Image (cartoon, coloured by chain):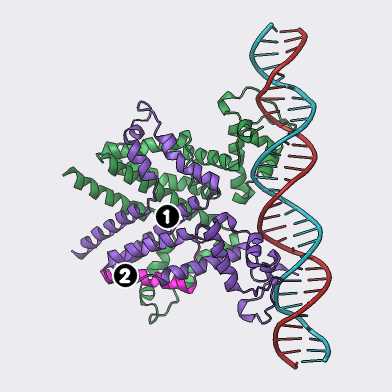
Chain colours: A purple, B green, C red, D cyan
Amino acid sequence: MNASERVVPEGARRRRRPTKQGVVLSEQLIVETALRLIGEHGAAALTVRRLGAALGCDPSALYRYFRDTDELLLAVADELIGRTLRSWRPTGEWRADLRSLGLRMHADYLTHPQAALLTCARVTGRTHEIRSVEVILGVLRGAGFPDAEAVRIYHVFVDQTLSFAALDASTLALPEQARAQEVQAWPEIYARQPADTHPNIAATAPVLVAEMGRSGYPAALEMMLAAAAARLQHVRR
Amino acid sequence: MNASERVVPEGARRRRRPTKQGVVLSEQLIVETALRLIGEHGAAALTVRRLGAALGCDPSALYRYFRDTDELLLAVADELIGRTLRSWRPTGEWRADLRSLGLRMHADYLTHPQAALLTCARVTGRTHEIRSVEVILGVLRGAGFPDAEAVRIYHVFVDQTLSFAALDASTLALPEQARAQEVQAWPEIYARQPADTHPNIAATAPVLVAEMGRSGYPAALEMMLAAAAARLQHVRR
DNA sequence: TTCCGCACGTCAACGGTGTTGTCATAAGGT
DNA sequence: ACCTTATGACAACACCGTTGACGTGCGGAA
């Protein structure tokens, strides 16, 4: 039997046969369990075998619901998009709205780094994504940006938010050991560069180490919003 | 023997013993072969076993040069940084220098999309990376930014460049079929949203489709540079 | 020039991974 | 109550990174 023939679309499912351990599987339950697994035990915990164990079923049973692990992760990602958008409320002030939406998206993606990594660059074309485009464009056009400007700023805003999310997520998604090493790298290596060969690093070492310990996204977002505001003033004249 | 004791620093290597197939290994050769493998057969092709086969040595021989695959990956990342930095010439004008450096880094990473994806989020702590930090900080401090400001802008600049590179690289790195589908998504889906449910998308559809067809990085970089220039003017007063 | 220590390539093995072919069984429409 | 077949279980496969043991032959010392 071909693998793609094995999976039955969720809507067409009729027989719900409990697992040996008494669990009744469903796409919804699997996705939720996967998200829980990632949240509780880190990104590395999401393996087909562990997911099977957590659900109380044989790992291969999952292939009745998803063609492969990639498809499973996409389903997880879609769930994430929905959750993010659902919790956002606009205020009517464009700059505050973009700021809160950006920070929220960034933060929500980081809650599930594994899914974020896989998802950030993909155009899903699904309802949640389309709605987010509509909403952001609405904020910008409502603020008075002309269409071309609004689209350009939308593009920068979305790509910047998603790409920073991916960048920061990939740090969180690293195996434990590599991540610890990453955190120590800046203090240990950059605080020790001699002033004669690396004057700029030496002169800024303390502030450099502090700065690199956190995400660059908030600062990047502020600079982007400032540039947009300046552009808006210029256009209005 | 402990794994970390097994690897000998490149400088201290004395005995160069050819492999059964007559290859003389070196850190340099291994990194170059890894990059070639990634470029030819995709990021997934970079496994210890395949790298060993491509080099003509036993997979475990690599552990004489790198403690684990992660350390190997960091070496690959640093090689990428080095290639970029080597081809860049400063002009003395900070804005032009940052612009050219950013665009060049972005472009260079995209020539090795698979490698960029794997490496661009990592702090290598190796020589090329350290030099790039020194150079960029020098440009900013030379322009008159106070230390704290210079560091903050450096952070935004570097993370923005790398994260956009990763975002754009991941599109290039998709399997052929998925990539074609991705390209068609914007025209096909967003050009067809009805004006009553999605007024903002419908109103901007042509310019939206055109804009999303290219990278957002140049526009993001310009906004970031504009914000930095405004900040510099403000500080100078 | 010889000789010896040990650097370094090789081998085999371990425990993990995703994935698939096959089978038994019970759910659900008839 | 039956029969079809959806679906979970099992076992196996090929691959992965990593490690410990081993022996060969290179390079420095004498």
Residue that carries the numbered disc 1 in the rendered image: A164
Does B94 appear above or below A165? above
Q: Where is residue B186 in the image (x, y as percent from the top left)?
A: 47, 68
Residue that carries the numbered disc 2 in the rendered image: A139
Does A151 appear above or below A113? below
* Residue furthest left as drawn: B237
Determine the chain carrying the residue at label 1. A
Quarter of the image for residue B194 reads: bottom left
Nearer the camera: disc 1 or disc 2: 1
Q: Position of residue B177 (x, y in %)?
A: 59, 63
* x 43%, y 59%: residue: A162
* x 50%, y 63%: residue: A122
The amino acid at mark 2 is: Val
User: In this view of the protein, which residue sits in the foreground, B160 or D18?
Assistant: D18
What residue range appears in magenta? A120-144
How busy is the neighbourhood of tag 1: few (under 14 within 10 Å), some, or many (20 plus)? many
Assign the C terminus of chain B to one quadrant of the image: top left
Question: How many angstroms separate mark 1 from mark 2 (CA)?
Answer: 21 Å
For the stretch drawn in magenta, what is the main secondary structure? helix
The amino acid at mark 1 is: Phe
Q: Which mark is residue A65?
A: none
Q: Is mark 1 on a helix, strand or loop?
A: helix
- Residue A24 left/right relative to A203: right
Q: Where is residue B191 in the image (x, y as percent from the top left)?
A: 44, 73
Does A31 appear above or below A107? below
How busy is the neighbourhood of tag 2: few (under 14 within 10 Å), some, or many (20 plus)? many
User: In this view of the protein, which residue sits in the foreground, B96 or A92?
Assistant: A92
* x 40%, y 70%: residue: A87
Assign the N terminus of chain B to one quadrant of the image: top right
Return the disc, 1 or 2, that comes first in the chain's sequence: 2
